[in-house]
């Protein structure tokens, strides 16, 4: 039987930074639907999704995650769509 992943458990995603694929750690907030993004031990900022007239959009707080927002959103959606149940 597979383990059931909790919604608040940290997970890893990969993004391309300056042509190099880098792993980033995503730590979900237990209280709010927000996610802290880390490069090893360094916080890059926070991302979350908001619903608007055009559908769901990814938002960010922090310079580094704003620059990577499109990739972060794509990788996190891929993780959520394919995580073990």
Image: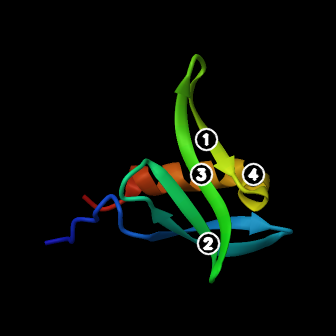
Task: Choose between 5 and 19: the one closer to the eye.
Answer: 5
Q: Which residue is mark 1?
A: 58
Rate crowding at label 4 as few (under 14), some (14 to 19) or many (20 or more) other CA atoms within 10 Å.
Answer: some
**N-terminal label among 4 and 1:** 1
Residue with the most extreme bottom position: 41
Residues at marks 3 and 4, CA–CA distance in whole angstroms: 9 Å
Circles 4 and 1, Cβ within 8 Å, touching? The answer is: no
Q: Secondary structure at mark 2?
A: strand
Rate crowding at label 3 as few (under 14), some (14 to 19) or many (20 or more) other CA atoms within 10 Å.
Answer: many
Q: Which mark is residue 66?
A: 4
**N-terminal label among 3 and 4:** 3
Residues at marks 1 and 3, CA–CA distance in whole angstroms: 7 Å
Question: In the image, 29: left or right of 71?
Answer: left
Q: Which mark is residue 47?
A: 3
Rate crowding at label 2 as few (under 14), some (14 to 19) or many (20 or more) other CA atoms within 10 Å.
Answer: some
Circles 3 and 4, Cβ within 8 Å, touching? The answer is: no
Residue at (68, 51) in percent of width and height: 61
Circles 1 and 3, Cβ within 8 Å, touching? The answer is: yes
Q: Is residue 26 above or below residue 67?
A: below
**N-terminal label among 4 and 2:** 2
């Amino acid at each position: 039987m597979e383990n059931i992943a909790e919604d608040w458990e940290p997970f890893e995603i990969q993004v391309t930074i300056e042509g190099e694929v880098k792993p980033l750690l995503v730590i979900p907030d237990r209280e709010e639907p927000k996610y802290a993004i880390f490069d090893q031990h360094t916080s890059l900022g926070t991302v979350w999704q908001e619903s608007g007239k055009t559908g769901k959009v990814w938002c960010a707080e922090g310079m580094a995650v704003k620059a990577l927002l499109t990739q972060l959103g794509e990788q996190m959606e891929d993780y959520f769509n394919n995580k073990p149940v």
